[in-house]
């Protein structure tokens, strides 16, 4: 007798077997575990400096900061203008190359939101010559040079006045300019040059006022070679500058801790042998 249930059962078995084979062949296998993503490396903070002592000191600061987990990228600029332009634009995070009167002058003129984070070191400005050994040997009509930025130009004129070469309108301090000279008995011809250029121009000058951070890379030793040297207690201590909105950034406080450390103080003392002193 024909059993109608057997073909149905057979068909169901075949369908079930086909479904199992399909699942085995096309089913998704568990994907291998992906390796854990490496933690993001903290971006280094970019610090703008001028070549010479500022850059040398930052190399020491960089090593100290790394011990505290802070990475620093040193960015060198060849003049006094661009470090503040770059800071204001956000291309760097801090800069260390200028004194406070210079920063204040830039902020006033360009309306930058830049402020002092802390003091660093003091570079006394010096007056140098390759042609005379003493200020009293300076000839009438001599060509002399000062930096062409308003603040350092004023410092230089104050040094000339201190040496008895000129007289300035009273009470101007670093704000004095060549138009404020009231007496010039030797009829000195004063050239206003870019600060970085003056050491390279010294052969063509009788006398020049040079910022220490440019004098030292040119082989000049302030405490030995300067005919006149600014007092270390001058108001021109160098500073770290930062955008006003970032003054309380904890990373920058780490940077400051590394800068104002005993290791840096020792380096400055041993490396510059009294020509530069710490200001903190």
Image (spheres, rainbow, N blue to C red):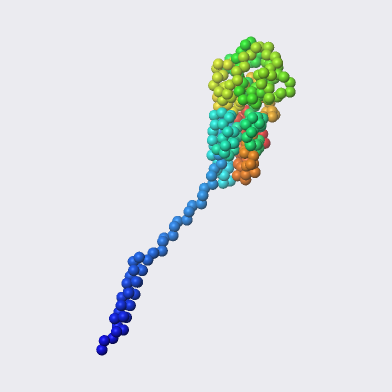
Farthest residue to the top: give it: 140
Q: Is residue 251 left or right of residue 18?
A: right
State which quarter of the image contains the C terminus. top right
The answer to which of 126 and 41 lies nearer the viewer is 41
Q: Quadrant of residue 264?
A: top right
Q: Position of residue 148 (x, y in %)?
A: 61, 23
The answer to which of 204 and 259 lies nearer the viewer is 204
Camera sees residue 120 = no
Farthest residue to the bottom: give it: 1
Q: Position of residue 49 (x, y in %)?
A: 57, 33
Residue drawn at x 56%, y 46% as measured from the top left: 69
Residue drawn at x 64%, y 33% as measured from the top left: 111
Farthest residue to the right: give it: 170
Residue drawn at x 32%, y 74% as measured from the top left: 15
Q: Position of residue 156 (x, y in %)?
A: 65, 22
Q: Is residue 40 left or right of residue 277?
A: left
State which quarter of the image contains the N terminus. bottom left
Q: Quadrant of residue 137?
A: top right
Q: Is residue 12 left or right of residue 106?
A: left
274 above or below 19? above
Residue drawn at x 54%, y 46% as measured from the top left: 42
Q: Quadrant of residue 232?
A: top right
């Amino acid at each position: 007798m024909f059993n109608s249930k057997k073909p149905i059962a057979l068909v169901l078995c075949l369908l079930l077997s086909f479904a199992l084979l399909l699942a085995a062949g096309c089913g998704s296998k568990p994907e291998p575990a992906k390796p854990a993503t490496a933690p993001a490396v903290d971006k280094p903070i970019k610090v703008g400096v001028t070549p010479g002592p500022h850059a040398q000191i930052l190399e020491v600061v960089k090593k100290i900061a790394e011990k505290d987990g802070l990475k620093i990228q040193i960015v060198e600029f060849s003049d006094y203008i661009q470090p503040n332009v770059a800071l204001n634009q956000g291309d760097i995070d801090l800069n260390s190359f200028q004194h406070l009167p210079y920063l204040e002058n830039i902020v006033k003129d360009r309306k930058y939101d830049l402020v002092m984070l802390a003091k660093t070191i003091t570079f006394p400005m010096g007056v140098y010559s390759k042609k005379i050994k003493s200020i009293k040997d300076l000839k009438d009509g001599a060509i002399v040079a000062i930096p062409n930025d308003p603040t350092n130009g004023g410092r230089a004129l104050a040094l000339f006045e201190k040496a008895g070469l000129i007289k300035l309108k009273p009470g101007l301090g670093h704000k004095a300019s060549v138009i404020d000279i009231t007496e010039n008995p030797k009829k000195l011809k004063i050239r206003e040059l870019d600060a970085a250029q003056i050491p390279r121009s010294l052969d063509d000058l009788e006398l020049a006022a040079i910022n220490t951070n440019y004098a030292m890379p040119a082989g000049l030793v302030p405490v030995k070679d300067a005919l006149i040297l600014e007092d270390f207690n001058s108001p021109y201590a160098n500073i770290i500058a930062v955008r006003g909105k970032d003054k309380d950034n904890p990373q920058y406080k780490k940077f400051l801790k590394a800068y104002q450390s005993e290791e840096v103080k020792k380096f400055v003392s041993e490396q510059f042998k009294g020509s530069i002193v710490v200001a903190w």
